Image (cartoon, helix red, strand yellow):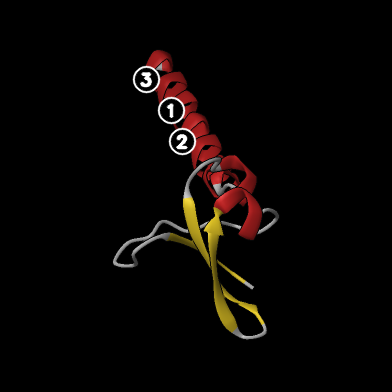
Amino acid sequence: MKLIHKTVAYTASALFLIVLHSPAEAAKGQHYPGENCVCKGCDNGKDLYGKCEVVCFDKEVFAKGSESHDYCKK
């Protein structure tokens, strides 16, 4: 019975750490070398197209989904 409790406690702790770490996985533009991105609203309210490491250098990059490129926001 102690083994079951220890296993459950260990599993719960491991899952908690995985969930806690997940939001930190969002990468900035410099982590996408050579990929094309769109910075929405970054060029005087207009979209700026270019390489992720340039146009989204210090911004969080989102997966393109239905967009034509990965993107970041101003």
Residue contact at pointers 1 and 3, CB within 8 angstroms:
no
Q: Indicate the position of residue 48 as horizontal and vertical percent values.
A: 56, 71
How many labels, in total?
3
Please report the residue visible at 65 percent of the width from the left and 54 percent of the height from the top: 54
Residue lying at the far bottom of the rendered structure: 45
- Amino acid at the residue labelled 3: Ile
- At mark 3, the secondary structure is helix
The circle drawn on residue 11 is 1
- Image coordinates for residue 25, horizontal then vertical, percent: 55, 43
1 or 3: mark nearer the eye: 1
Secondary structure beneath dot 2 equals helix
In the figure, 45 relative to 6: above or below? below
The extreme left residue here reads 66
Element at label 1? helix
For the N terminus, the quadrant is: top left
Crowdedness near tag 1: few (<14), some (14–19) or many (≥20) residues, C-alpha within 10 Å? few
According to the picture, the residue beneath numbered tag 2 turns out to be 15
Q: Residue 4 has which mark?
A: 3
Along the polypeptide, which appears first: circle 2 or circle 3? 3
